[in-house]
Image (cartoon, coloured by chain):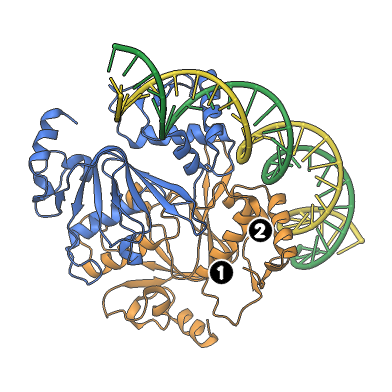
Chain colours: A blue, B orange, C yellow, D green
Amino acid sequence: MHTSERTRLRGVANTETDCASCPASRRCWGEALPNETVHARREPPLERGARLIEQGGAPALFIVATGCLVLRVGLPDGSQRVVGLRLPGELVGLESYARGEQTYTAQAASPSAVCRLRVPALGTGAAHGALLERLLLKSAAQPERAAAPWAGLPAVERVAAFIENYTQRAQLSGREDPFKLPLTRADIGSYLGLAPETVVRALGHLSQAQRLAVRGRTVRLGGAV
Amino acid sequence: MHTSERTRLRGVANTETDCASCPASRRCWGEALPNETVHARREPPLERGARLIEQGGAPALFIVATGCLVLRVGLPDGSQRVVGLRLPGELVGLESYARGEQTYTAQAASPSAVCRLRVPALGTGAAHGALLERLLLKSAAQPERAAAPWAGLPAVERVAAFIENYTQRAQLSGREDPFKLPLTRADIGSYLGLAPETVVRALGHLSQAQRLAVRGRTVRLGGAV
DNA sequence: CGGCCACTTGAAAACCTTCAACCTATGTGG
DNA sequence: CCACATAGGTTGAAGGTTTTCAAGTGGCCG
């Protein structure tokens, strides 16, 4: 995002606006968003580590504007697992309208900004058709629509698939080639079902195989696919 | 499902009807479905092994009436993986409206029946609000909304979680306690990311631990949770 | 009856996790 | 500005789990 845009968006924080008037509307809703289709309110920026929603909390729906959110669920035994990522343009919290409460905790993995979507009385039949249709299509397109396709792959391939999936979803517009992963090895491991040490070693193997170059959280995609 | 209902539904196969007039409407849409909310057409019954949709095929949306569908994706390397199950009341094919084509193949794991949902021009803004809202809520409630929570668990726990999840989703109305799993060990393994042999051994362990009783595809839930 | 497919079992090899130690970067307080 | 504390990252070795391979069983259908 350009600085000018960021500045302008900060200006409208906490103001309810029509998404059609947002300079970043294309990122969230695609090419042409007609007026009055979606209303949203830019929330105050989230620092790294800040929580947007809490598992069990009240239903609410957000769309990520910038940054990256990590979704975690607390298991009955007290442990936590990462169950998803949300990148700019993706929805957070939709599941809560089906369950009556938030099904996961969402925490900023890097400094992030989100917009709260105004969904008039979802569940009572009062919402606007065009908005619902947008949401439905977005929902159908969400990342985890089916079981993790990497289940059962060896650790190296899982990590490779994760990185590739991340780069495709984060619209890294080419310029930012050496990009920065917002997640710790532990979080990646939790998401993929691997120990953090295994993630480290897998990244090492991928580096040695020239499939990518890693140093800390900085990653550059490397020649051989 | 009672015989009388099955007969009646067969009677309306290939006839477009209002779901509100369907005797099984509650299973799909919950308690009260107002008239004219959803229109559907009962498709000819699917025998075990029959394919409902093909990966890459034209967008279409179904709701499972009876039976069980297995969803598979073909990977670039030619192999196939099971990425989901669909049980009565669940949607099949919704993702296709976001992608423009079907993202998985759906095959009947047991004799099944489905209804094709009439979604007026989804993607063009002409659909009815109440229908969209129903679909959105259903979509938000779908099983694989987040990464598989069993990733990283030991094989025995994965299989146990799978069985439990299955029994909860299949509305086994108590009477059918020794129920029949419609999937082969290989399919379960593919879904969970385990080798078929590992599924066999995990089921063995669960049996010995009295957590369930298995013989072939017949399963009875056993005392200790 | 024969063939096929799903299922089962055993043993060896491969893989991943665990544990423990150590390293590096970052930020804080003195 | 340095010393220290902390969190994340890295590495090695041991042990456990899972996969793989191989062989054998059981049921179902032509």
Secondary structure type for disc 2: loop
Above/below status of A207 relative to A88: above
Query: At 43% across and 50% down in the image, what residue appears?
Result: B57
- Disc 1 residue type? Thr
Front residue of A34 and B220: B220
Q: Position of residue A53 (x, y in %)?
A: 30, 53
* Circle 2/circle 1 CB separation < 8 Å: no
Q: Position of residue A155 (x, y in %)?
A: 57, 35
Query: Is residue A74 left or right of B159 when viewed as pictured?
Result: left
Determine the chain carrying the residue at label 1: B
Query: At 19% across and 54% down in the image, what residue appears?
Result: A117
Q: Position of residue A192 (x, y in %)?
A: 50, 41
Marks counted in the figure total 2
Which is in the foreground here, disc 2 or disc 1?
1
Q: Quadrant where the N terminus of chain A lies?
A: top left
Query: At 41% across and 57% down in the image, what residue appears?
Result: B93
Secondary structure type for disc 1: helix
Disc sitting over residue B167 in the figure: 1
Q: Spatial distance from mark 2 to mark 1, Cα to Cα?
A: 16 Å
**Residue A149 visible to the viewer:** yes
Residue A12 position by quadrant: top left
Above/below status of A158 relative to A52: above
Residue A187 position by quadrant: top left
Above/below status of C15 relative to A90: above
Q: Position of residue A91 (x, y in %)?
A: 29, 50
Above/below status of A199 relative to B145: above
Query: Which residue has dot 2 on it?
Result: B184
- Disc 2 residue type? Thr
